[in-house]
Amino acid sequence: MSGTAVVVAGDEEAGAALSAALRERGIEARCHGSSDLAGDLVELEADLAEQGPDAAVAAGSGQGALALAITASKLGVPVAALTEAAPDADRAAEARIIAALATLDAGSDPLRAAESIAAWLERP
């Protein structure tokens, strides 16, 4: 999968584990930190427009993941979701929005998600 690149944002621990697993499969995975929703939207739009990744992965359901899903969808970048097993009530609305924007629900386990995302990226 040489030359394939994704941007990962959201839950730092899950995002780091997923990024490492994707790199093991030859996929360049860049993590984007999160500050606040408005700042993330602006930063991610500039980053995604400049970098032109093959896909975006929203890790969890926090504001960083939500900002990535919204921005990637706006720019026509396919979105995969690394879902939380049981998002708390505060994040349930964010999780529903991310699920609606994602083309792929990669599940909640970062290692299995990496396999799903790699296969998804190989599609024509």
Image: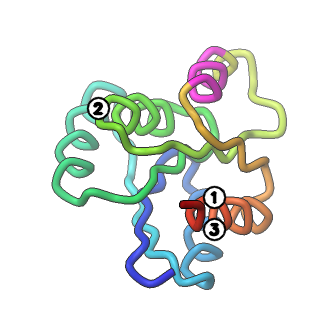
Q: Earlier in the sequence, mark 3 or mark 2?
A: 2
Q: Is residue 8 left or right of residue 104?
A: left
Disc 2 marks which amino acid?
A: Leu
The image shows residue 109 at horizontal and vertical percentages of: 80, 57
Q: Residue furthest front?
A: 124
- The Cα–Cα distance between marks 3 and 1, rounded to whole angstroms, is 5 Å
Helix, strand or loop at mark 1: helix
Q: Tell me whether circle 3 and circle 2 mark residues in contact (CB < 8 Å).
A: no
Mark 2 sits on what residue?
Answer: 41
Residue for point 65% across, 75% down:
21
Sequence order check: which comes first, mark 1 or mark 2?
A: 2
In the image, which residues are magenta? 93-100
Q: Is residue 100 left or right of residue 68?
A: right
Query: Identity of the amino acid at label 3?
Result: Ala
Using the rendered view, name the quadrant where residue 18 is placed: bottom right
- Label 2: which secondary element: helix
Q: Nearer the viewer, residue 77 or 68?
A: 77
Distance from disc 1 to disc 2, alpha carbons, whole Å, reads: 25 Å
Q: Is residue 40 above or below residue 18?
A: above
Q: CA distance from mark 3 to mark 2?
A: 26 Å
Give the residue pinned by disc 1.
120
The spot of residue 68 in percent (x, y) is: 41, 39
Report the coloring of the rendering. rainbow
Q: Amino acid at mark 1?
A: Trp
Residues marked 3 and 1 touching at CB (< 8 Å): yes
**Neighbourhood count class around disc 1 (C-alpha, 10 Å): few under 14, some 14–19, many 20 upward:** some
- Residue 24, percent from left and from top: 61, 85
> Residue at 53% of width from left, 84% of height from top?
26
Magenta span has 96?
yes
Q: Residue 118's mark?
A: 3
